[in-house]
Image (cartoon, rainbow, N blue to C red):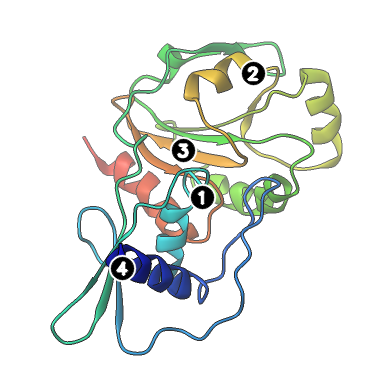
């Protein structure tokens, strides 16, 4: 029990030194605190060293889940934090069928063999809105590449989405009235950003994004695969 308390305190102390982004309409607030003394190493579930931003993105991928981060103090005094695997990564893309706001159909089968970048949002989500310029910039880097598709889904009615897009720019293919599809993914909290491999598996599952370079590199890495 003492070890668990020490770990919980140390993790909270460390996370307080990082800048957390709000997720959907939920914000995570930490009291200001200095960074822990000595060297700190951050690792993903495979043991790879990652940046602070990547650590935050993975840690907050499912912000309602209990924290399963492991902490270990090495012989030289270095404190190592290791994240657990995001459980949705490796799962298959749900077999959905929907219509884009222009009326054309879009199904999971239409996306076979392509890298798919998904965003889930809703009109009343300020965090969703704030990340749209960066999502547009990301999509622009892959304009003309027929092997990658950017799709956004919202439960908002198609008519409301059209009105929103008449005044705001969002350069993803857009699906409204998507509540049945959202249920298939089984997540809570917005926004959600996902990358699907050419084989139809989830390879990247995040909420808000701080490590935009990592987001882009995942897309490119999947495109480079034969």
Look at discs 2 and 3 and give the one toward the viewer: 2
Look at discs 1 and 2 and give the one toward the viewer: 2
Q: How far apart, in angstroms, are the residues tagged by discs 4 and 1?
A: 50 Å
Q: Mark 1 vs mark 3: which is more N-terminal?
A: 1
Residue at 56 percent across and 70 percent down: it is 19
Residue at 44 percent across and 16 percent down: it is 108
Provide the residue designation for mark 1: 141
Quadrant containing the C terminus in the rendered view: top left
Q: Quadrant of residue 81?
A: bottom left
Look at discs 4 and 1 and give the one toward the viewer: 4
Mark carried by residue 124: none
Q: Mark 1 vs mark 2: which is more N-terminal?
A: 1
Provide the residue designation for mark 2: 179
- Does the CB distance between marks 1 and 2 fall below 8 Å? no
Quadrant containing the N terminus in the rendered view: bottom left
Give the side of residue 23 with respect to residue 177, left or right.
left
Give coordinates of residue 170: x percent, y percent: 70, 40
Q: How far apart, in angstroms, are the residues tagged by discs 1 and 2?
A: 29 Å
Give coordinates of residue 95: x percent, y percent: 43, 13
- Does the CB distance between marks 1 and 3 fall below 8 Å? no
Q: How far apart, in angstroms, are the residues tagged by discs 4 and 3?
A: 38 Å
Look at discs 4 and 3 and give the one toward the viewer: 4
| In front of the other: 180 or 98 | 180
Few, some or many C-alpha atoms within 10 Å of disc 1 (few <14, some 14-19, many ≥20)? few
Few, some or many C-alpha atoms within 10 Å of disc 2 (few <14, some 14-19, many ≥20)? few
Look at discs 2 and 4 and give the one toward the viewer: 4
Residue 195 in the image: above or below residue 10: above
Provide the residue designation for mark 4: 2
Mark carried by residue 194: 3
């Amino acid at each position: 029990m003492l070890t668990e308390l020490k770990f919980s305190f140390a993790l909270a102390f460390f996370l307080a030194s990082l800048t957390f982004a709000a997720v959907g309409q939920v914000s995570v607030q930490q009291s200001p605190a200095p960074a822990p003394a000595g060297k700190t190493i951050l690792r993903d579930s495979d043991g790879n060293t990652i940046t602070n931003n990547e650590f935050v993105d993975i840690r907050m991928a499912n912000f309602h889940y209990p924290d399963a981060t492991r902490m270990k103090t090495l012989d030289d005094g270095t404190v190592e934090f290791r994240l657990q695997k995001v459980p949705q990564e490796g799962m298959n893309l749900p077999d959905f069928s929907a219509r884009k706001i222009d009326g054309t159909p879009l199904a999971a089968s239409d996306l076979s063999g392509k890298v798919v970048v998904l965003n889930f949002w809703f009109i009343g989500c300020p965090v969703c809105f704030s990340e749209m310029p960066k999502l547009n910039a990301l999509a622009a880097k892959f304009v003309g590449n027929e092997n990658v598709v950017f799709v956004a889904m919202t439960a908002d009615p198609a008519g409301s989405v059209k009105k929103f897009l008449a005044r705001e720019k969002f350069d993803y293919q857009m699906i409204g009235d998507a509540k049945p599809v959202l249920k298939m993914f089984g997540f809570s909290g917005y926004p959600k950003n996902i990358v699907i491999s050419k084989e139809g598996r989830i390879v990247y599952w995040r909420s808000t994004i701080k490590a935009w370079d990592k987001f882009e590199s995942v897309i490119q890495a999947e495109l480079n695969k034969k």
